[in-house]
Image: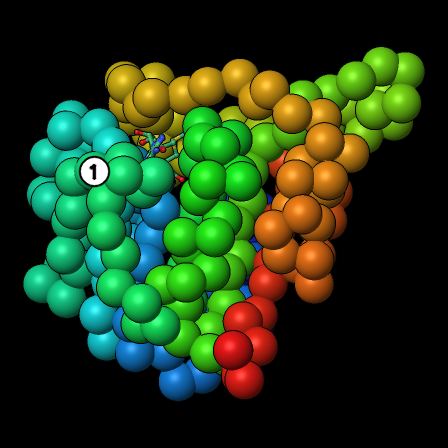
């Protein structure tokens, strides 16, 4: 990963793009095939396509998949479907990624499917939202507001960032408030993937990271 990739995150106006470099760093090497779950307009799938031979970009919104098809290069296959319903190939993906989508889904239903679709040694790495609970999450809330608005205050001075913000306002991306608190996320993940790591991140998000054992 080039030294400047973290700057892409910092100079991103939106919080999903902010986390893209983190996921790219987690990809295994080599990385032939990746699945991006809840791909939205395919912006991250297009970046993944520079790092992987083949990318499957899956989303349950026909509007998002239509937009993704316009945004991705030829080695990305855009798939319309609900990840809980579609059939995924077993032991196939080197990595499964997801940004701001897992909280739209039932973790106990979806995580076993994603685990089965990874090849042994493959990685699942996802950023999703948790529901803040007060007063416990107050320090995380304050830190999140400071990082987001601090970053945006800097970006207001960058013309390209201002342009990108206007495009985002028209995005129409399906969003959902998270139902689970962080301890509830940890509990559900532990039940399905006991070795997975769930880390609290700023901006009301957590990272779920799991490597499928080589022997399974
Ligand atoms: C907040 S958007 C994030 C999009 C994209 N990952 C990004 O970073 O810009 C969440 C996406 O997840 C998709 N989604 C929600 N539930 C889904 C499901 N069960 N299967 C596949 N995609 C789903 C939505 O249609 C939406 O495009």
* Residue 60 place in picture, x, y as percent: 24, 32
Q: Residue at x 42, y 55 (%)?
A: 114
* Residue 193 place in picture, x, y as percent: 62, 56
Q: Residues within 10 Å of mark 1 (few under 14, many from 20)?
A: some
* Residue 167 place in picture, x, y as percent: 29, 25
- The verdict on label 1 being within 8 Å of ligand 1 is yes
Taking the image as shown, residue 146 lies to the left or right of residue 105, namely right
Taking the image as shown, residue 53 lies to the left or right of residue 105, namely left
* Residue 177 place in picture, x, y as percent: 53, 17
Q: Nearer the viewer, residue 41 or 38?
A: 38
Quadrant location of residue 201? top right
Where does label 1 land, which residue? 81
Q: Residue at x 67, y 47 (%)?
A: 191
Numbered disc 1: secondary structure: loop
Q: Residue at x 49, y 49 (%)?
A: 111
Q: How is the image coloured?
A: rainbow
Say if 31 sits above or below 8 in the image.
Answer: below
Q: Would residue 67 be seen by someone viewing this image from the given angle?
A: no
On the rendering, which quadrant does ligand 1 occupy?
Answer: top left
């Amino acid at each position: 990963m080039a030294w400047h990739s973290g700057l892409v995150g910092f100079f991103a106006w939106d919080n999903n793009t902010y986390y893209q470099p983190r996921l790219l760093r987690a990809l295994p090497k080599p990385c032939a095939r990746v699945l991006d779950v809840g791909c939205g307009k395919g912006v991250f799938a297009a970046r993944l396509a520079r790092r992987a031979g083949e990318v499957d970009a899956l989303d349950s919104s026909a509007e998002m998949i239509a937009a993704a098809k316009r945004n991705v290069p030829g080695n990305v296959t855009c798939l319309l479907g609900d990840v809980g319903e579609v059939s995924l190939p077993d032991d196939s993906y080197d990595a499964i990624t997801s940004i701001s989508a897992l909280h739209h889904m039932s973790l106990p239903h979806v995580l076993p499917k994603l685990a089965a679709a990874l090849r042994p040694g493959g990685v699942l790495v996802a950023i999703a939202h948790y529901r803040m609970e007060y007063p416990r999450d107050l320090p995380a809330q304050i830190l999140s507001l400071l990082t987001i608005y601090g970053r945006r205050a800097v970006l207001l001075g960058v013309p390209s960032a201002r342009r990108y913000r206007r495009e985002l306002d028209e995005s129409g991306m399906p969003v959902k408030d998270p139902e689970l608190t962080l301890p509830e996320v940890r509990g559900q993940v532990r039940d399905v993937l006991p070795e997975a790591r769930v880390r609290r991140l700023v901006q009301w998000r957590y990272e779920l990271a799991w490597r499928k054992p080589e022997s399974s």
